Amino acid sequence: MEYVLLGWPDVGPTLTLDWRSFSYAGKFVMSSTGKAVVRTGDGSGPPVTEDGDAAADVVAAAAFNEDRTDSSVCWIRYITVREDYRGEGIGPDLAAFVAARARDRAFDRVRIAVNNPFAYQALYRAGFHFTGEETGVAELVLDRPLGDGSDVEGAAGDRSRSTYQAGLDIYRDRADAADGPDLSADEREFLAEKTASDPPAPVDPPA
């Protein structure tokens, strides 16, 4: 796999993804966010950019920008993985890649808001931790401090079992609520399996 930074928001990169294969495809046509992609290099898959140039091998993409009120914080707004490549660990690797590039650009931390337990787990694998905060759209906010760069290869912040489980408990409580979201059977099984477990070890960012 090849991990590529297409550009930061000041460059205004755009990306057209096939909505049949990628979630949030419409969000990537905007030039207000930076973009990074993962390519296989084998030419498989549908065309994904506006000009179609060397784009058929893209299997994942991320969009990110600077926090509107804190220039030291980079927000990952969306991460999407092509349907036929989901579950292979590409999402966590891409998030770790973006965090490393954000460190190079002198950001102090990277944040992301997630709306399901699988995304929560994936970002923990990328070295993030739950902040205890939720957004107005019932998303959990995760954070990754970048420091002097040494922790990009590991992890920083409160990655204790109790903090990890606190986020999962929010999903469990929502699933049990009468007016809560309708979690899938796989999500419910995942939450049950992770009871009392430690957070996953963080991956190393791809070069």
Image (spheres, rainbow, N blue to C red):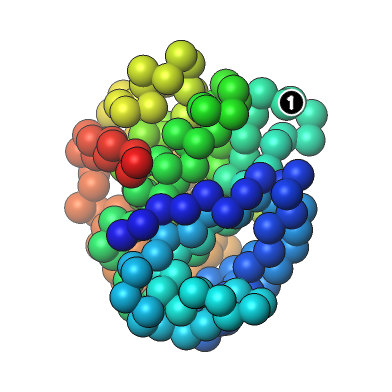
Q: Is residue 165 visible?
A: no
- In x, y percent, where is residue 59? 41, 69
Say which residue appears at 23% left-offset and 47% top-offset.
194
Comparing 48 with 196, the one in front is 48
Question: Left or right of 62: which side holds 15?
Answer: right
Say which residue appears at 32% left-offset and 28% top-offset.
153
Q: Amino acid at mark 1?
A: Asp
Reading the image, the residue beneath label 1 is 70
- In x, y percent, where is residue 175? 44, 59
Question: Left or right of 186: which side holds 37?
Answer: right
Q: Dividing the picture into quarters, in which one does residue 165 lie?
A: top left
Instruction: Classify mark 1: helix, strand or loop.
Output: loop
Say which residue appears at 41% left-offset and 53% top-offset.
3
Q: Residue furthest top?
A: 148
Question: Left or right of 204: which side holds 178?
Answer: right
Comparing 157 with 35, the one in front is 35
Say which residue appears at 74% left-offset and 63% top-offset.
30
Comparing 2 with 164, the one in front is 2
Whether 8 is drawn above or below 50: the answer is: above
Quadrant position of the N terminus in the picture: bottom left
Q: Is residue 9 visible?
A: yes
